Amino acid sequence: MSRVDKAAIVRAAEEVVRDRGARKLTLDAVAAQCGLSKGGLIHHFRTKQSLLKAMLEAAISREDDSVATFVSSGDSLLVSRLKSIFELMEDDKGLPRSLIAAVAEDPMLLGPVKDKEEQQRRDICDAYRDPEMAELLILAAQGMFLGRVLGVVESEDPIIERLQGRLLALSADLN
């Protein structure tokens, strides 16, 4: 690569995590993946933690973009959030699983995720007549997501699609 920016480095790091797992994410591995020297990589990300933080921020941004796409197509905020979680469940390449493992190594990386969840909770409270039910639906979807990511729930399990439909139907009742 002749010109590598931070976004390209983050994508290369995601590929390393997908292909080899979070424990194999090293600055050397990422540098090799994107064709940089380790010094060139360190120019952008001084530590593995700063790179992991950028990866989490990119994942949050992608989820935000997904929610915005669903909202722009006419879905409510709650339905959009649920559909975005369901999309994440379909990532069979393991990035969510690997990012969870990375966060387990350094819980301080959860800061942006917690901030996002707090903002979404405020948005839901402002938008729905029964914000507790809306939050319950989101937490149920997140539980399904974690079950899928951790391998407790198989993707082929027919209950997943039925439960997703149920959550969407329940969310429609809140509008």
Image (cartoon, grey):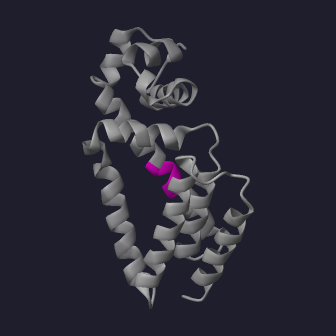
Q: Provide residue 78's location: percent of width, then percent of height.
A: 53, 74
Which image quadrant: the N terminus? top right
Identify whether 138 is placed above or below 12. below
Q: From this viewpoint, which residue is outermost toward the left?
A: 108
Residue 170 is left or right of residue 143, and the answer is right
Q: Is residue 53 visible?
A: no
Residue lying furthest front:
152
Magenta-drawn stretch, dominant element (helix, strand or loop): helix
Position of residue 95 measured from the top left corner of the image (x, y, whole percent): 53, 38
Residue located 41% across and 84% down the image: 131
Q: Is residue 61 positioned above or below 38 on the image?
A: below
Q: Is residue 116 left or right of residue 30?
A: left
Does residue 27 appear to the left or right of 65 in the view shown? left
Q: Position of residue 11 (x, y in %)?
A: 52, 30
- Picture quadrant of residue 91: top right
Q: Tell me: 1 left or right of 60.
A: right
Q: Report whether residue 4 is seen.
A: yes
For the residue pair 85 and 35, the one nearer the viewer reads as 85
- In the rendered view, tell whether residue 75 sits above or below residue 65: below
Quadrant placement of the C terminus:
bottom right
State the residue at coordinates (65%, 74%). Answer: 74
Provide residue 90's location: percent of width, then percent of height. Answer: 65, 50
Along the line of sight, which residue is nearer the eye, 175 or 18? 18
State yes or no: residue 63 in magenta.
Answer: yes
Q: Which residue appears at 38% of the width and 18% of the height?
A: 27
Residue 27 against residue 167 in the figure, above or below = above
- Could you say which quadrant of the image residue 25 lies in? top left
Q: Residue at (62%, 66%) from the top-left corner? A: 70
Count of numbered circles on the image: 0
Magenta-tinted stretch: 60-65
Residue 2 falls inside the magenta stretch: no
